[in-house]
Image (tube, helix red, strand yellow):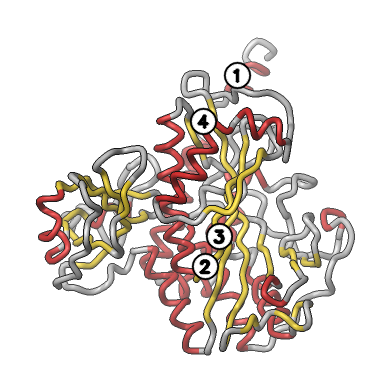
Amino acid sequence: MAGEVFKLPEGTHTVVLGIGDLNGIMRGKRIPSTHWETICKSGNALSIALFAIDMTSDVWDTPYVNFGNGYPDMHMFPLEEPVALPWELGVAFCMGRAEGMDHKPVPIDPRQVLIRQVERAKSMGYTVFTGTELEFYLLDPETLQPRDQGIQVYSLSRAAELEHVLGPIRQQINEAGIPIEQSNPEYASGQVEVNIRYDEALKAADRVVKFRTLVKQLAHEHGYLATFMAKPFFEPSGNGFHTHYSLWKDGKNVFADNGKLSATGRNFVAGLQKRMAETALCGSPTPNGFRRRQPFSFCPINTTWGPDNRTVGIRIIEGADSAVRCEKRDAGADANPYLLLASDIAAGLDGIEQGMEPSEPTLGNAYEDEDAEPIPTNINDAIAAARGSSFMKDVLGEDMCELFIQQSEREAGFMEAQVTPVEFDRYLRNF
């Protein structure tokens, strides 16, 4: 199916065109500008296996794409006008969309999962706005350790020391079309957070996919390895992916009622609470991601909610009507943004449609709330919850859900088949 021919920035010789894979990692091709018009009109062929590989690019037989059907092609088309990359002269960058050879959406395209929920919200009269907060580590590429020491969260001195790399990340990614609001050192050596301005949910998810790949490129340019791995070190803080939600109708935030959370907002929160346990894989698809989910770690372990409380699973931010929103805090920075946002929005919309009511808000330490419903803190429990969830199958689609769960099962199997260095050191000489 012919697509729109997007104009290239002046002086462009190469276009980077990519889409988010099963894990929200951007994959694609570099295309000469001389071939750009053809790509826009006819698409760029690549294997559907892009949606059926793990984070290491390993492939396995799945129901939708496998050795039996020969791993067939799909086409990638540009979604937007390419933007010049400030750090690569003559190179432009562009988000793409996937289309099957039958000119229909690809059933295992994670982006389609979110599109369905955005369209569902629209049919209910709502526009979903989402803010994303991602933490990541800047490490020495040789030692794979932070270059700085100590916890200096929000420290302006530490911020100045990191400005040689964080400055370009803020400024040049902003110039590349992703509006950046701020950056700060986080709660561990080498850990930082960069906030992207909130926007409509699909645009927000696309920006996360682009942001993570551009951060890694810019960090490399400045001599660092950037990682969004959820828990690269056991004791220091893990990398979170906090998502802020509000629904808007006729130009007004329906979550707001004189600066407080409205009845509709409470319904949405109740929906999130109901599904947090069974959709835990959408926020943490690997065993490593569940290492974040520990008591007193600022990562929630239950479905509690409450106003301005960082120990709960769902934090409510109140104030000006335009700012009232709920923040879901359990996901890791390695989560696929399409699946994470889609499962959250679907749960919240269910809450509104069914008039659900949340539990009593938690005003104190949610880690000590013995009555709170727990969420999985290990991947095997999360896999079991997902396997038994008709909600997950309905939201992701049967093929997408099976593929996604299979990947997590494989990751769990890989970890269980290892003898760790800690085991070796403790037991080899002592037994």
Q: In the image, what residue type sits under mark 3?
A: Arg
Q: Residue furthest front?
A: 10
Between the C-alphas of marks 3 and 1, the distance is: 46 Å
Q: Is residue 145 left or right of residue 217?
A: right
Q: Depth-wise, is mark 2 or mark 4 nearer the camera?
A: 2
Residue 81, image quadrant:
bottom left
Q: Is residue 97 visible?
A: no
Check disc 4: other Cα within 10 Å, few if <14, some if 14-19, many if 20+.
Answer: few
Of the residues shown, which amino acid type is indicated by label 1? Phe
Residue 40 versus residue 422 in the image, above or below: below
Q: CA distance from mark 3 to mark 2?
A: 7 Å
Quickly name the residue at label 2: 199
Q: Which residue is mark 3?
A: 197
Numbered tag placed on residue 418 in the rendering: 4
Secondary element under disc 1, as helix, strand or loop, is helix
Q: Residue at x 58, y 47 (%)?
A: 194
Of the pair 217 and 270, the residue shown nearer to us = 217
Work out how far the residue at label 3 is from the one at label 4, CA to CA, in angstroms: 41 Å
| Vertical order, 402 against 294 (above or below) | below
